[in-house]
Every structure is written in C-alpha cells, then in structure tokens.
Amino acid sequence: AKASGRNSICFFNPGMQVEMDARVVLESDLHKSWERNEFVLHYQPQGDGQRVIGAEALVRWQHPRRGLLSPSEFIPHAEETGLILPLGTWVLETACAQLAAWARDPAMAWLNLAVNVSPRQFCQPDFVEQVLCILDHAGVNPQKLKLELTESLLLNNMDDTITKIAALKARGVGFALDDFGTGYSSLYYLKCLPLDWVKIDQFFVRDVLTNPNDATIVRAIILLARSMGLEVIAEGVETEAQKLFLAQHGCNAYQGYLLSPPLSSGQFQEFMQQRGG
Ligand code: C2E
Ligand code: CA
Ligand code: CA
Ligand code: CA
C-alpha cells in the first residue's frame, strides 16, 4: 500500500472531530452559563452515627437543554479555560452565605460545610485573603468552613501550600485531604501538610465488605490517620454494613446515599427538619 502523500496521513479522524465540536460547544455554553447564573450548589449531609454534623457543597450546572450536569462534566473544562476562578469564588461565596443562613436557624446552627477547592484556585497568590474576605463578608465563624483539597493539587510548591493552609488554619478554617489514597503521593502529603481530616475515597469503600484488599486498605487508612491525630470521614457509604464496618474500625464520620444524596438548599432544610437534628 502506498502510505505516502501528505493527504494520506490522517491526523484527524471523524470521531476526534465530533469530540472537539462537543468540547467547543461545551466551552462556549460554559461562558454563557456563567453570565446567566446557571450554577447551583447542592449539599450532601455528613453524619457521625448519631447526628448530622455538616455537609459537602457540590456544584451543579443547570443546563438549559441538558438538565442538571454533574461537575465531572464541566469542572475539567472550567479548569482549562480559567472559568474555575470566578466559579470557585462563587462557590465559596454561596457556601458561606448558606453557612450564615444555617447559623441563624437553631435547628441547623451547629452544621459545618465542606467546600471543594480546585488546584488552580488554591494556587492564586491571594487565595488566603480571598477566603478570609468572603468569610468576613458573610459573617461566618471560620471554624464552620472546611476546605477539601485533592492530591492533584498541591505539588510543585509545597512551601507555598503549607503557608496557605497554616494561615487559614490559624483563623480556624479546617482542611481535609480528599479522595485519600487515589493519588500517587498521599503519604507525602500526610507527612508534610497540616491537615485536620482525611477523606477515604468511595473507590475503597464500595467493595469494603467483599474485597479483602479494600478492607485492609480502609483499616490501614483509618489507623494511619488516627495515629497522626487526624479525623477520618468516608465517602460513598451506601449500606448499613459499610457504615458498621467503618465504625468498628474507628471511622464514625460518613457521607453517602445511606444518609442522603446531595440535596438542594430547600431539600436540605426539609431533611434536617424531618430528622429533628
Ligand atoms: P468528590 O469530592 O469525591 O465528591 C463525591 C462525589 O460522590 C459527588 O459526586 C457525590 O454526589 C458522589 N456521591 C455521594 N454519595 C455517594 C454514594 O453513596 N455513592 C456514590 N456512588 N456516589 C456518591 P459529584 O457531585 O458528581 O461530584 C464529583 C466531583 O466534582 C467531586 O468529587 C469533586 O471533586 C468535584 N466537585 C464538586 N463540586 C465542586 C466544586 O464546587 N469545586 C470543585 N473544584 N470541584 C467540585
Ligand atoms: Ca470532595
Ligand atoms: Ca471525595
Ligand atoms: Ca471521590
């Protein structure tokens, strides 16, 4: 076969073209959505076995044609285009406004709120000032706010990361290492960063009762975190049996469909009323 000739070399197969088009559409949609205020925060309750201790704020995009889109469908694009910066600010502002509203309601006054922070957002030189300014503006006790960092985050500039965490911790803000164990340098972060919480990824929780390796890993994570004086929370807890296993091994805090899926602000309030705290 004649593989020569410039036109015979196919850099661009039709599948790639479709993928690219979808991406370009998504990215231009994303910009419009920003102007149209199409983002919402949902809140997934976190429990400790007795009561609801707080929630995690999870962003959704209310797309005019495609409905409610999950963050995995647009956060990566928002990261690439830089939209994650205004979006991340909006998430923090909205989360803190929600915390302020809960603090005024005796049925929810003790709740904490965890907020996911993207790498690009955290790396901004004024990240610390921004968070403090938003807390101050909302009139929220910084101890109610917990920031979830992922391992992909941190990296090249460990000193800068430690400085930022320490500065916010000095004001009372808590830090969790999210999706623990799924990155490639978890133990390094555990050693170096002044964290408060370790969050066990649902990837390990899912088969904890049927897969002996997962059970061993989960037990080891709990032991490790607790020996270092850190608190542990598990995500993706879907069954009583998983919750029991975790509790028996020293992890009482959990989040997952067993307690509740992520809820709109109004649904969350109803959820709290129905449980009576
Ligand atoms: P994550 O931080 O690991 O969040 C947990 C994900 O697991 C959420 O998906 C949640 O809806 C889902 N989940 C909760 N309980 C269960 C369960 O019992 N079983 C199963 N199978 N899944 C459960 P979601 O909301 O689609 O969020 C996906 C990811 O998007 C999050 O993963 C987080 O990394 C990112 N994300 C969400 N909100 C934000 C945000 O405001 N900013 C940034 N930078 N990232 C965000
Ligand atoms: Ca998270
Ligand atoms: Ca997580
Ligand atoms: Ca996860």
Image (cartoon, rainbow, N blue to C red):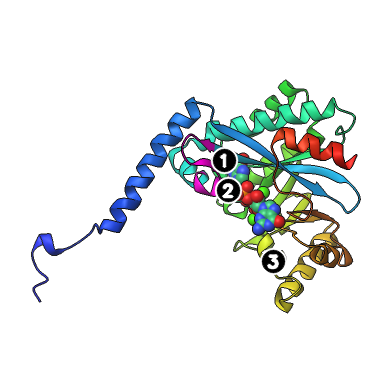
| Labelled disc at residue 204 | 3
Q: Does the magenta stretch include residue 73?
A: yes
Q: Which of marks 1 and 3 is nearer the N terminus?
A: 1
Q: Is residue 114 left or right of residue 91?
A: right
Residues 17 and 116: in front is: 17
| Residue kind at label 3, given as amino acid type | Phe
Residues 86 and 67: in front is: 67
| Residue kind at label 2, given as amino acid type | Asn
| Residue kind at label 1, given as amino acid type | Cys
Tell how many labels.
Answer: 3
Which residue lies under the disc numbered 1? 123
Cα distance, mark 2 to mark 3?
29 Å
Q: Residues in magenta? A: 62-74
Q: Residue visible at 20% across and 61% down?
A: 10
Q: Give x and y (percent) for residue 158.
A: 62, 50
Q: Residue visible at 71% across and 28% down?
A: 132
Q: Residue visible at 84% across and 44% down?
A: 53
Q: In this view, does 277 lie to the left or right of 186?
A: right
| Labelled disc at residue 157 | 2
Quadrant where the image shows the C terminus: top right
Vertical comparison of 15 with 43: above or below: below
Mark 2 surroundings within 10 Å by alpha-carbon count, few (fewer than 14), some (14 through 19), many (20 or more): few
**Residue 275, located in which quarter of the rendered image?**
top right
Vertical comparison of 1 with 130: above or below: below
